[in-house]
Image: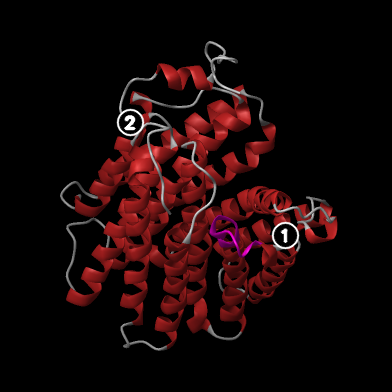
Amino acid sequence: MNAAAHPAKPGSSASQRRAYTGPAVFSHGYRPFFLGAAVWAVLAMAGWIGLLTSGGNLPSVLAPVDWHAHALLFGYGEAAMSGFLLTAVPNWTGRLPLIGWPLALLAGLWVAGRLAVTFGAAFGPWPVGLIDLAAPALLWLAIAREVIAGKNWKNLKTLGLLGLFVAANALFHVEAASGLAAASGQGARLGLAALVGLVLLVGGRIVPGFTRNWLAQRGIKDEALLPAREDRLDRWGLVVCIGVLGLWAVLPRHPVTGGLLLAGGLACAARLARWKGAGTLGEPLVWVLHLAMGFAALGFLVLGAAILFAPALRPAGEHVWLAGAVGLTTLAVMSRASLGHGGLPLTVGWRVGSLYGLVAGAVVLRVAGGVWPGLWLIEAAGLCWIGAFAGFAILYWPVLTRPRGTVRFRG
């Protein structure tokens, strides 16, 4: 059916977008933030490799290792999360999306935060912290307004995790300004816990749904071969995992936390096994989500083992979560949502599939680099990360910057 046969209601999201005449990149929330996330992922990792190999410093209020942690956790994480929420929340609530100059302002504040944290030593820690917190605080207010006005109470959990992420960023700045090692502090742990919690929460909605749709399109109707529908077991598994994340953020070295992390990893793995990922190997947009959820489960297990048996594994577990679970999930969502909202077929080939492989390779190399230092494995992991997100920025540039319906995508 065409749009002329069923014109959009005045004041609807569709009519608002059709009336928009500004730059295409600000016509939808996912566009500037997904593009910004990819570009920043490349720049931040390239900067970190440069610091590692040269031993130099940035004109930043943060120590180099703190800057690295903040750049990927709160810089990249915020952009990817902003693009997703600004796209998903209007669908959840039925309210108008943020487009045009308000969206440009929010994206500009995010860019200002990256510049301030990286080059703002002359301003001092407190002004830099306020600049950096402006975008996520406004995002939280915008999402809160939409959830409350739309009476979309189901997504108060999402709002709560977003609020925790903003508070964690503030705590990170306080710790850094107080002379503490913020990269290994409570702010970083809370921020990582919030992102992994969002991955598990959103993953529980999209992974089985997308998998079921893909398998059904291929004629599979047997319920035994399709992902299990959400039930009490799935919901309790999520509760356990998020609860353990909170405990780890507060008590990261307690033996009880270690045991519960192992239990959380098993709960994540059991949840994932119900979603029938083995049948999705023919479509990268689907199997990558299962791989990302696998990294989430693995992160629980590695961090639990680090507490109970081998403390040297702690950085490995954190990188499995941040690069594997968060990095791969966000790249997968950015890949799929950009196509879907751009009116393009929801299928990709070896080009996009190779980007996912590069991120997975980055995780493996980073973990190996912690076990066998001095072999340039960490730098190799960084290059894989750069390749993945540079590839996304190049492949998806026309999708994210040109009007809907004017792009042919070859991924």
Number of the front mark, 1 or 2: 1
Residue visible at 42% across and 72% down in the picture:
362
Residue labelled with disc 1? 275
Tell me the chief SS of the magenta region: helix
Q: For the residue marked with disc 1, what is the amino acid? A: Trp
- Whether 4 is drawn above or below 171: the answer is above
Which residue lies at the image location 51% right of the left edge and 48% below the top edge?
A: 336
| Quarter occupied by the N terminus | top right
Say what secondary structure mark 1 lies in: loop
Between the C-alphas of marks 1 and 2, the distance is 38 Å
Residue at position x 36%, y 25% in the image: 100
Residue under numbered circle 2: 104
The verdict on residue 173 being magenta is no
- Point out residue 313 in the picture as x, y percentages from the top left corner: 51, 80
Magenta residues (range): 280-288
Q: Is residue 314 visible?
A: yes
Q: Quadrant of residue 265?
A: bottom right
